[in-house]
Image (cartoon, grey):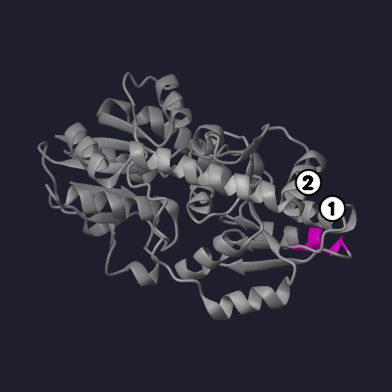
Amino acid sequence: MHQIVVGAERHDAITNMAFEIREILRTKFASEIFSYHAPAKDLLNEIHQLESLPVGTADDRIIYHLSFGIPQLTQLLLERDEEIILHYHNVTPSTRYKSLMPGFAEALEYGRKEIELLLPKVSKAFADSHFNANELLDSGYESVTVLPAGLDAHRLDSEPIDPLFLSQLSGYFPHGYILFVSQVLPHKRVEHALAMVHLLRTVHHLDVGLVVAGPIRQRAYMYALEQFRKRFNDCHVLFTGEVSNSELATLYRDCLCYIGTSEHEGLSVPPLEAMANWAPVITRGTGAVPETVGLGGIVLEADVGILEFTETVAKVVADAELQSVLRRAGENRISQIDSRFSKHELGQLLLGELS
């Protein structure tokens, strides 16, 4: 039973989930991961290009991780003999991309059409969240199992703090920083995080910075962020780009709090990793975020304004006791998730559903 992903990067959430699923599948099946786009160079020994996917039969199955639309990939899936097991990670709405990257926007719109195109071929459907499951049900799927298969909030537990990186962070931000972890993409609304740190420094007089940790996927958006940043005379921001697991663990454990400003999320892994690494979490409650974070952090309204968001962050940054309360709440939330989705139970459920 093989898996197909659209693309594969070392620190990409879907790629990491596919690795965890592969580990479970290999207890019962021959299983590899294949990527439509060429995998990152450091993954070439672990993930194969789609062209090398072996011929299958009607007795075989393919787990397809749907997160983006590619007509050629849809056609390939429809023409193959294997059953399709759909693992739906959500497709980002195209609104933010139509003017900036029209080709990318078209692919996102096609991804939503693909949900319906694949329906006749799908024998089982999984979704990362109830939010995602409802999208499949609205598209005609009769049964969807809510199962964030491969989710591992503890993947950084064994990672040590990077002392050199920690020293660099202390040099940049001697009084601490708030943390934003995500791919740098328009719908993540990184500009809101930039505006917030400016307000924290100039209105609330808090000597804090902002670290934006994550790969820069679209240069046009990054250029726009840089121009936006230049409008502030006092905006202490560090864009790290892609970081190692050890550096990411260091950021979570050292930050004053984690913030999430995205306007659309089908699951949202970073706040879970933040909670697992003892970081207070404050996030906008869009998409699946409320069900993901639960009572483990402060979940603001989806349409919260920057001023109100900043007020909340300021209260947390200035109150060590409130930070401790949020850390304990995050720990409790992760314990709840662990009790629902331990790797052993996840394996039993996943293999049971696929048997």
Nearest to the observer: residue 165 or residue 127: 165
**Residue named by callout 1:** 199
Q: Is residue 344 above or below residue 36?
A: above
Q: Amino acid at mark 2?
A: Thr
**Residue named by callout 2:** 310
Specify few, some or many for label 2: CA neighbours under 10 Å numbering under 14, 14-19, or 20 or more. many
First along the sequence among labels 1 and 2: 1
Q: Secondary structure at mark 1?
A: helix
In this image, 221 relative to 122: left or right?
right
Quarter of the picture containing the C terminus is: top left
Q: Position of residue 173 (x, y in %)?
A: 73, 70
Which numbered tag is attached to residue 284? none
Nearest to the observer: residue 107 or residue 93: 93
Specify few, some or many for label 1: CA neighbours under 10 Å numbering under 14, 14-19, or 20 or more. many
Q: Position of residue 314 (x, y in %)?
A: 78, 49
Which stretch did the figure color magenta?
226-232
In this image, 355 relative to 342: left or right?
left
Nearest to the observer: residue 192 or residue 289: 289
Residue visible at 9% across and 37% down in the picture:
59
User: Dominant secondary structure of the magenta stretch?
Assistant: helix
Q: Position of residue 57 (x, y in %)?
A: 11, 41
Nearest to the observer: residue 141 or residue 260: 260
> Is the residue under label 2 in contact with that under label 1 (CB below 8 Å)?
yes
Q: Is residue 179 something that shows in the picture?
A: yes
Q: Is residue 80 above or below residue 181?
A: above
Alpha carbon separation for disc pair 1 and 2: 7 Å
Q: Is residue 308 above or below residue 222?
A: above
